[in-house]
Amino acid sequence: MSDTPAEQWGIYVHIPYCVRKCAYCDFVSSAASAAAVGEMADYAAALRAEILREAPPLRTRWGDAATLYLGGGTPTALPPPLLTEILRTLIDAAGMPQECSVEANPGTVDAAYLRQLRAAGATRLSIGVQSFDDRLLRSIGRIHTAQEARAAVRAARTAGFANISLDLMYGLPTQTLDDLKNSVGAALALAPEHISVYGLIVEEGTPFAAAAAAGRLVLPDEDAAEEMYDYLMETLPAHGYARYEISNFARAGHESRHNLGYWQSVPYLGVGAAAHGCIDGVRWGNEPDAQRYIRAVRMGQPVRRPEDPDRTETSAMEEYAFLALRTAAGIDAADFRRRFGMDAAAVYGAVIARYERQGLLRCADGRIALTPAGMKIGNEIFAAFLCDG
Ligand code: SF4
């Protein structure tokens, strides 16, 4: 892949702590116990050291980072002074970004905490609500109630956040379409700028996987889950939230710039345990264990593990294509040609023609994008782009 100058770059920071693990979650995070509070301070110090080591050279090369994103885990499981110190270090090292997102969980933030985050430079808050039904929230192991979720959104507004995203889930155990409608209604009533929706996936190694294996997990059947999906895809755009990526909806101008960067193959630095990064077409994942990560940073040892060492021009092209196809804008043919020196339409001619005929893909205005029907079976189409590329 040619070394194209980056118009922008971003930084992802991983905070691997949560108050308690949710029953469906396989993200790299551990429940924060009293004993972990000391570890959190060590972790924050290691993070700041990694940021100060890695971000300045990229700033020298490309200018200020366009986006910063603190995710997890639950960043707001950290005591406020630790999280605000990380934010300040980031902005000192990488410059003032156009967007600085922090993931937060209701039940971990109040107005005072959010005011401090805003003062430290956070501009966007992504709140993990998942549902406004207390029974469902309990059943999936969330630590908060619907009322606490509403309170978190109000506190964020009071603290000055003008850009708020809410996460919702569907296909939860025993969830009905009416349950989902109630949650969507409650979310819309809070008028967030952005909404992400995720269907439950039972991931290996989670309490939900064990419950499913024991026949104790009652999930909506396929038809019910499809009805929920169709309802979301119709309702959110009807309320002014355009679908700009398979799972993401936003009011005009409030798309997540950072996440769009991932799908548009913008370079990003990943810092922290288990964080992933991709710079100059080289992907890596950091040491996933928080304690080992802290020790390695302290001793000045490398924390990165290369991913995909057998990467080829073809696999880079495939990755670019399937990431871009997740977005409503799709593959930008001119950008593809600039990066790879080839026409996407020539590389993927057969697969494009097949899905275009079926109404699942469209080529127009220099872009190749999935139609709404195509997005519904996105994984199947992405696989075709991998195999036929
Ligand atoms: S709060 Fe988020 S990261 Fe933490 S356990 Fe729950 S789903 Fe996973």
Image: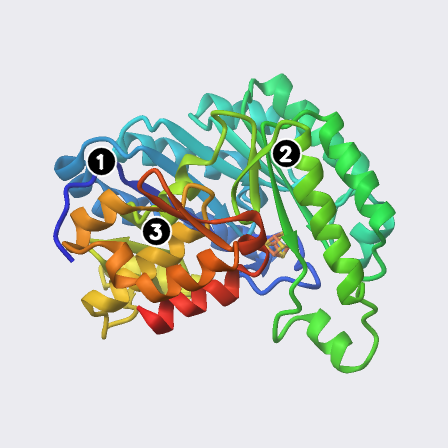
Disc 1 versus disc 3: distance between alpha carbons?
21 Å
> Mark 3 or mark 2, which is nearer the start of the sequence?
2
Q: For the point 26% across and 34% down, which residue is it?
A: 94
Q: How many C-alpha atoms fall within 10 Å of the one at disc 3: few (<14), some, or many (≥20)?
A: many
Residue 205 screen position, x and y as percent: 62, 75
> Mark 3 or mark 1, which is nearer the start of the sequence?
1
Residue 344 screen position, x and y as percent: 27, 55
Residue 378 screen position, x and y as percent: 52, 59
Q: Quadrant of residue 34?
A: bottom right
Which label sits on residue 7? Answer: 1
Q: For the point 74% across and 49% down, which residue is it?
A: 143
192 to 33, vertically: above or below: above
- Which mark is nearer the camera, 1 or 2? 2
Residue type at the position of mark 1 = Glu
Q: Nearer the viewer, residue 58 or 359?
A: 359
Q: Which residue is mark 3?
A: 271
Q: Nearer the viewer, residue 14 or 386?
A: 386
Q: Which residue is mark 2?
A: 237
Q: How many C-alpha atoms fall within 10 Å of the one at disc 2: few (<14), some, or many (≥20)?
A: some
